[in-house]
Amino acid sequence: MKGAPREERDYLLPSEQARYAGLPELSETLLFKRREGVFLVVAGLFLGTLAMLNILGITRFIDLSFTVPGLGWEVPMPLAVGVLPYPVTFLCTDLISEFYGLKRANFVVTVGLLLNVWVMFILWLGGALPGFSGEDPTGVFFQVQTLAFGAVTASMLAYLAAQFVDVQLFHFWKKLTRGRHLWLRNNGSTLVSQLVDSVAVTLVTHFYAQALPIDVAEALWPQLLTFIGASYMFKLVTALADTLPFYALVKYLGRYMRLPTTDALPDDVR
């Protein structure tokens, strides 16, 4: 028990809390409550965000295009509104991977997949059950249902690939660096997995759901690459921006739960 890797044992023994000088020793019961409480909050945020983005999905596209100052370059940024909260899911899985290990991270990812199936089932059931006479078959619910079916299908396929890539890469970098360079596993795993997600969700949304605002008078693939590039650029910026919050959360939660942090904030990002 005492010599097992963190992900193969439940909690640090109270005697192991000595590394936290100046902090009061906690009972195993209180450690259990704190660690399971944090896990519940982070996993709940992950699953709640996932459900929200799948419902919002492709119900609206927003235009965040901008011009590069001084160069005059026009950078197109068409984004589905469901993309906005998506980077939060990667921050959550990285936190779970850091503190609770590979098995729990993969478990939460799997539950997220089942949540997608549950959302699709309720949307299907809501449309299959009889409504009142005179109901508009093109009403708000059915519009949301059609868009959500496309969004959830695209999300499920992309989600499976991207989230599992994120978790596996996180632990690959953690093992390769022997627990050091927290910034590398946080960003290295997320940036690759979000590229996988951006490509998959764009292609499935177009070829399966036919839901992208494509101009049929223009060439298809340049437009698809624009959507992929815009989605990935947004995720790239937000992934890099979450490095400092990730460090701060790892440091604070590590002390709160008496779990050792494996890295320190590098001098160049202090």
Image (cartoon, rainbow, N blue to C red):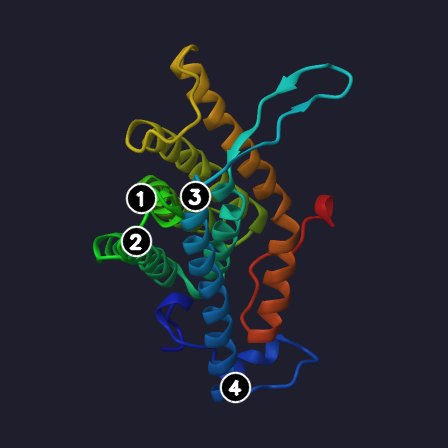
Q: Nearer the viewer, mark 2 or mark 4?
A: 2
Instruction: Note whether residue 178 is visible.
Output: no
Looking at the image, is 20 positioned above or below residue 234? below
Where 68 sits versus 117, above or below? Answer: above
Of the image marks 3 and 4, the number of the one nearer the N terminus: 4
Q: In terms of sequence position, does the residue under pointer 2 or pointer 3 come before the other?
A: 3
Rendering coords of residue 40 (x, y %): 46, 71
Q: Quadrant of the N terminus?
A: bottom left
Label 2–label 1 contact, CB within 8 A = yes
The earlier-in-sequence mark between 1 and 4 is: 4
Q: Residues within 10 Å of mark 3 (few under 14, many from 20)?
A: many
User: Circle 1 — which element?
Assistant: helix
Q: CA distance from mark 2 to mark 1?
A: 8 Å
Give the amino acid at mark 4: Leu
**Residue to which mark 2 is pinned:** 123
Measured as percent of width and height from the top left, residue 269 is found at 71, 46
Number of the label disc, if any, that sits on residue 95: none
User: What residue type is disc 1 on?
Assistant: Phe
Residue tagged 3: 57
Q: Callout 4: few (<14), some (14-19), or many (20+) C-alpha neighbours within 10 Å? A: few
- Residue at screen point 48% across, 50% down: 90
Disc 1/disc 4 C-alpha distance (Å): 43 Å
Q: CA distance from mark 1 to mark 3?
A: 9 Å
Q: Amino acid at mark 3?
A: Gly
Residue at horizontal 32 percent and vertical 39 percent from the top: 150
Q: Label 2 is placed on what type of residue?
A: Leu
Q: Are marks 2 and 4 in contact (CB under 8 Å)?
A: no
Which element type, helix, strand or loop, lies under badge 3?
Answer: loop
- Identify the residue position indicated by label 1 in the image: 149
Residue at image mark 4 = 30
Disc 2: CA contacts within 10 A as few (<14), some (14-19) or many (>=20) = some
Q: Secondary structure at mark 4?
A: helix
